[in-house]
Amino acid sequence: MDIIQTKLPGVLLIEPDIYQDSRGFFLESYHTQRYQQLGEMTGFVQENHSLSCYGTIRGLHAQVRRAQAKLVRVIEGEIFDVAVDIRRGSPTFGRWAAAALSAVNRRQYFIPTGFAHGFATTSYSAQVEYKCTEYYDPTDEIVILWNDPEIGIPWPIQKPVLSAKDTSAPTLRHIHHLLPHFETTRPPELASDQIF
């Protein structure tokens, strides 16, 4: 598999090895021994599966005390997947990185703890599966406004379908006091010999 560093340290785009023939294809969507070399990609305790219609934006979401690292992939359709650094004191605080994930390119997106996550559905519908390193805790969740102007994500959807929670979310500035600290959530650096 190939590991692609994004502009945010610790946020990784993964291209798995795909074995394809006249019957279809095969790939390993997760392998503990290989993925554990990439930092927080072990100890997954929950896997989620969502279906979203075209134009849906889910996010931006994170947990603070029970922070979740996520490994995201698409099994039907296509999404614009986003990670935002929400670690107070981080040199990349408030910056974002995005990737197009689809059932065709079969890429995965790894989002470490200390980052908010969201995605937009850019196909007729999309089914998304993602592993989490911590259980969902609604009392620990923070939600950030999807179109926060200070973050400035260029979403490919102009009039999104949103949940009530996402519609009324505060900006990053308004919840700054709730955010995790950089020093306690710093992802490990990816050494050059870990790209394989």
Image (cartoon, rainbow, N blue to C red):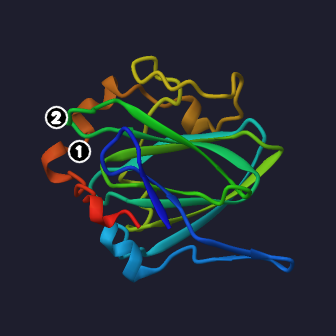
Dot 2 lies on which element?
loop
Q: Amino acid at mark 1?
A: Pro
> Is residue 39 at all visible to an observer of this figure?
no
Q: Residue at x 23, y 45 (%)?
A: 180
- Residue 108 position in % (x across, y down): 54, 59
Which dot marks residue 146? none
Which dot marks residue 180? 1
Q: Residues within 10 Å of mark 1 (few under 14, many from 20)?
A: many
Residue extending farthest top: 149
- Residue 186 position in % (x across, y down): 20, 51
Residue designated by label 2: 89
Give the quadrant of the C terminus: bottom left
Q: Residue at x 34, y 74 (%)?
A: 36
Q: Residue at x 56, y 36 (%)?
A: 166
Work out whether 184 lies above or below 170: below
- Residue 136 position in % (x across, y down): 45, 62
Tell me how far mark 1 sits from mark 2, CA to CA.
9 Å
> Is residue 69 at all visible to an observer of this figure?
yes
Is 109 left, or right, of 74 in this rendering?
A: left
Dot 1 lies on which element?
loop
